[in-house]
Amino acid sequence: MSLIDAENVTVRLGGQTVLEAVDFRIARGEIVTVVGPNGSGKSTLIRTLVGALRPARGRVRRAPGLSIGYVPQRLHLDETMPVTVGRFLDLPDPQPPEAVAAVLARVGLPGLVGRSLRGLSGGQFQRVLLARALLRDPDILVLDEPTQSLDQPGTAEFYKLIEQVRAETGCAVLMVSHDLHVVMSASDRVICINGHVCCEGTPTVVSAAPEYRALFGPGTGGTMALYRHEHDHGHEHAHAHGPGDG
């Protein structure tokens, strides 16, 4: 059974149609990445799938009791308030110290419970946000462009960590990303949107799809094809969609 299943979803914001006739599904343990140009509706899709936005048409079904761990695109902190990592992870509800220690170790930050958030690097802070999401013991981990402030090595390390978390916990992962070269290698399935679903499938075939190349340029496909994923073997096909299709 899918953890989240969307059918013919159309979303309007401020009188404008942002997404039209989108179909989506994600199964337990699957890593699905949503890509698309700026303004294509990626974040709107995520917010609709998790229930923060209500579609104008279509329906979204979530598995009963679904636990969602969310890692935001960015988080602005009050610079005048010195908050430690441990205190931040205790918000809004206090967590058992052993659980906090375990989750910090899992994201590669052992012993940082007493460190001030203001003293963390960008990569460390993103890992703290990931730790906070993992404290929910999520069925699905949702990440909205989580590496926007990281350099290329930090980005690659973060996605490698996401793959490890998926392997260890069995949770599904739904990501929005601009990091095309890296994220393609970390995904089981890629969905390319631009107000509607342009194409979807395994990373290798999506990177070669005409709809994908039309959005990101003909040179990206060849580079992306180098990042073959182990799940690309067999049943490789991309589904292309027109603007009026799901």
Image (tube, rainbow, N blue to C red):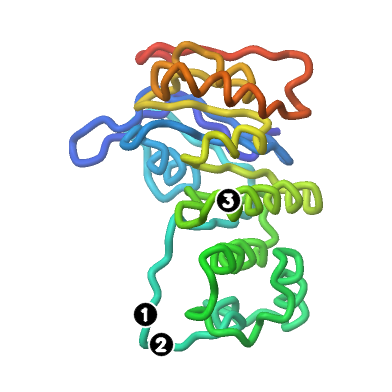
Q: CA distance from mark 1 to mark 3?
A: 25 Å
| Residue at x 74% of width, y 53% of height | 165
Q: Is residue 111 above or below residue 209?
A: below
Residue type, numbered disc 2: Met
Q: Position of residue 79 (x, y in %)?
A: 37, 82
Query: Mark 2, residues whose alpha carbon is within 10 Å: few (<14), some, or many (≥20)?
Result: few
Residue type, numbered disc 3: Thr
Q: Is residue 67 above or below residue 24?
A: below
| Residue at x 63% of width, y 28% of height | 189
| Residue at x 35% of width, y 30% of height | 19
Q: Are marks 1 and 2 in contact (CB under 8 Å)?
A: yes
Q: Position of residue 66 (x, y in %)?
A: 63, 50
Q: Is residue 40 above or below residue 82?
A: above
Quarter of the figure with the C terminus = top left
Q: Quadrant of residue 57?
A: top left
**Camera-side residue of 186 and 68:** 186
Q: Residue at label 2?
A: 81
| Circle 3: element type | helix
| Circle 2: element type | loop
65 relative position to 78: left or right: right
Residue type, numbered disc 1: Asp
Quarter of the figure with the N terminus = top right
Q: CA distance from mark 1 to mark 2?
A: 6 Å
Q: Residue at label 1?
A: 78
Q: Residue at label 3?
A: 155
Q: Nearer the viewer, mark 3 or mark 2?
A: 3
Q: Earlier in the sequence, mark 1 or mark 3?
A: 1
Q: Are marks 3 and 2 in contact (CB under 8 Å)?
A: no
**Camera-side residue of 160 and 40:** 160
Q: Nearer the viewer, mark 1 or mark 3?
A: 3
